[in-house]
Each structure stands twice: as structure tokens, then as C-alpha cells.
Image (tube, rainbow, N blue to C red):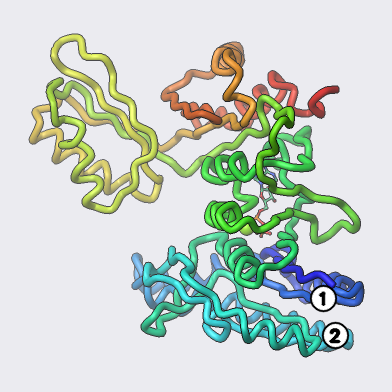
Amino acid sequence: MAMIVHKYGGTSVGSVDRIQNVARKVKAARDAGNQIVVVVSAMSGETNRLIDLAKAIQERPSPRELDVILATGEQVTIALLSMALEKLGCPARSYTGQQVHVLTDSAHNKARIRDIEGERIRADLDAGRVVVVAGFQGVDEHGNITTLGRGGSDTSAVAIAAALKVDECQIYTDVDGVYTTDPRIEPKARRLDRITFEEMLELASLGSKVLQIRSVEFAGKYHVPLRVLSSFEEGGEGTLITLEEEGMEEPLISGIAAQQDEAKLTILGVPDKPGVAHHILGPIAEANIEVDMIVQNVAEDATTDFTFTVHRNDYERALEILRATAEELGAREVAGADDIVKVSLVGIGMRSHAGIAATMFATLAKEGINIQMISTSEIKISVVVGEKYKELAVRSLHEAFELDKAPGH
Ligand code: ADP
Ligand code: ASP
Ligand code: MG
């Protein structure tokens, strides 16, 4: 007998019919002799609806109260799924995050899981029940309801899987696995049979929303076998997220990610002297704004230009702060743009191969796409280009690196 966590996302539980479909899948897995814990998201669109309700009252809702309202979305789904299971004659019980003690820190709207008490879940499993747990939510040490950030049900599922030391954590979603790039952008994208934690982590951080970043981090850290599968199609193998295996030939590039929610800021003509970078980014950090890419140009006339990117939500605030800094530093000008997209190539095979960047830049140049910023690490190369080039950049790179073909073919 295996113990398995199933996680179903918003689209998969988006209607009563779909919830009944999920119930059938869960029942089939249980009838096959497994112990099943199901983690569910809110019905699709529900979390956005709840955020809009809160925003209709407060432009920046109180993070604590926002979590109270957000957690209701998942509570609806757990009850409906348990009812659907009972209707099929499959004993089930639903629990909120609080009821199974998903203990988190107190960072409302982006809380991190610290601990989960597996006993209650185990007792139900041993009594032959399917346990249905609300994803995305937890409780802090003071009893406040918290949520884990958008897409956080993935992390709930992996954390429960780690706490129970289950045999596999299966993420059921509206695609049948992890693809070489978002199949909505490039229909020729190819499903990967397996991908390493390291690559998946990069792809998730660089904009592939198929798994929440923290769920991949968690699975890597606690060695949770993780698989992405379709909730609509039967029988596929999906994509297994694995550790890198010694001696295995890794493809050069595993995937392409595109991230559209960044904005770029530049301060031009700042004096080129020690401490300037700190003077520019210090106030940004103090305002709790996270900086992603940073580029500083070579100084020619004892001044330099300094460019960085932030989340688009922080753009206006960052611009205001930068204008104040520019005055203090006697800089020439502040400029910014929020119509940008970051396109990234990810692959473990990149480590041992030169020339990937050259091919990437040549491909973009051939399409007439201007590169505004570049950053690289051991297993990724990212470029910032105009937002309108998103599809063209992804598709031309997908073709240039022949990602539609299985490696070795
Ligand atoms: P869920 O509601 O089940 O959590 P999400 O919308 O969060 O589903 O994630 C699934 C979506 O992720 C897919 O519909 C797909 O458009 C998108 N996606 C982005 N990049 C990839 C990728 N590399 N492989 C597969 N899906 C991807
Ligand atoms: N319902 C939450 C969201 O929409 C969590 C999730 O779907 O994973 O972000
Ligand atoms: Mg998701």
C-alpha cells in the first residue's frame, strides 16, 4: 500500500462537475489500495474575486484581514470534494489548514510553512478515509490565519507530503506535465518526462507558473518525489521532478520561461564613485522592494548609468524613491519602463557548453528584437526585451534550440 498526496488546482476544481471528476480519480486511486491525502485550491477565479472584494473596500487591504477572506476560497472546495467522495461511497473528511496545524510564520499573504502535525491526517488514513486538506492556508503561532502567496496550494501539498513521508506527491493540473515552455505561448512545446529540481526551481523563479517556487524548494530540500500530471486526461506519466543523476546526459536547454511582471528603472549620469550603488539601492531595500536584475554601465565621463528591475507592483513606488535619490546624487535623469518581459533559457547542460548565449543573442537579433538587459548564472541566461516581443522571442528560441525535438533524435 502506498501513501500518495494528490493536489488539484483551481481549473481542476472549477465547477461542481469537475469536482465530481476529481472525486472519481481520488476514489480510483484509493480503490487501487492506496492511502490518499488530497490538497485542493479554490475554484478557478475565486481567489481573484475575493481579492477584488477586499480592494473594493481598501486599496491596500490589511494583510491580516486579506488572509481571513482568502482562506475561505479553499474551504468551499474541501467541503464540496468531501461530499462528492461520500456520494461515491468513499469515506472522506475535510480539514482547513488550521485544523491540521499547518503552522506558518506571521508573514501574512506570503507566509512560510514551519511545521505540520501529521497525526490527525494519519489517524483518518488508518481509519480508511480520504483526507481532504485546504491548500494555500495555515495558521501562525498566535492563531492568526495566514496564506502562502499565489499558487501556494502546491507548497501545501509538498509540505504535507514531506510531513507524512509519502511515496509521491502528485500535482494534477490543466496540462499533462512540465513542458519545454508554456504550451499556451508555444503550441510546439514538448512535455518533459523528467526535469531536475534545480532546473524546475529556475523555471519557476523565472516565470513558469506551473509549480509555485516554494513547492519546488521544499520538495528538493526534503526529497519529496514530485510529479506533475493532467487532471483531465487518464493514464499519462506526467513529468517527474528528480535529483540530477550521475553520468546522465543532460539536454543543453531544458526549458524557456517568460516573466511579464517586472519593470525597469534607470538612473542616468550618477557620479562614478564608491558607495553609489548602495546609495541607490539602500532606500529601495528599506521600502521592502525586491530588486531582481542589476546592470551598471562602464563610466566614461566620471558618471555612470545604473539600471535595475523590480516587480511591476512596486514600479511607481520605486520610481518615486529613485527620483529623490537622483536629486541627492545630482544625477542627470531617471527613466523607467514597465512594458518589458524577461525571457530565460534554463538547462543543467549549459554548465559544460559555451556558445549558448551567442546562439540566443543571434536568434533574437535575427528577429529584430533589441536586448535591454542580460543576466546569467550557471544554469540560466535571462534577457529583458520589449513586452510585445514575448511570443516571438520564446518561439524563435524554442526553434533555434530545437526544443520541440526529443534530445538524441
Ligand atoms: P493550477 O490551477 O492547477 O495550479 P496553474 O495555472 O497554476 O494551474 O499552472 C498550470 C499552467 O502553467 C498551465 O496551464 C500553463 O499555461 C502554465 N505553464 C507555464 N509554464 C509552463 C511549462 N513550462 N509547462 C507547463 N505548463 C506551464
Ligand atoms: N487559490 C490560490 C491562488 O489562486 C492558491 C492556489 O491556487 O494554489 O493563488
Ligand atoms: Mg498553480
From the image, tell me which residue sits under label 1. 23
Q: Looking at the picture, which amino acid does disc 2 mark?
A: Cys
Q: Residue at x 69, y 48 (%)?
A: 241
Number of other residues with Cα within 10 Å of mark 1, as a class: few under 14, some 14 to 19, many 20 or more: many
What's under tag 1, amino acid-wise?
Ala
Task: List x then y, in percent, for residue 173.
Answer: 73, 58
| Residue 185 in view (yes/no) | no
Is residue 223 depicted above or below 39 in this figure? Answer: above
Task: Decide: is 81 above or below 343.
Answer: below
Task: Tell whether 184 sits left or right of 370.
Answer: right
Q: Position of residue 404 (x, y in %)?
A: 78, 28
Q: Residue at x 45, y 72 (%)?
A: 104
**Horizontally, is 236 left or right of 322 in the view?**
right
Residue at 71 percent across and 62 percent down: it is 169
Do callouts 1 and 2 mark residues in contact (Cβ within 8 Å)? yes
Q: Position of residue 179 (x, y in %)?
A: 73, 41
Instruction: Find disc 2 in the rendering and name its residue.
Output: 90
| Disc 2 secondary structure class | loop
Within 10 Å of disc 2 (Cα), the crowding (few <14, some 14-19, many 20+) is: many
Instruction: Give left or right: position of 168 versus 161.
Output: right
Measuring from the top left, give residue 117's x and y in whole percent: 56, 80
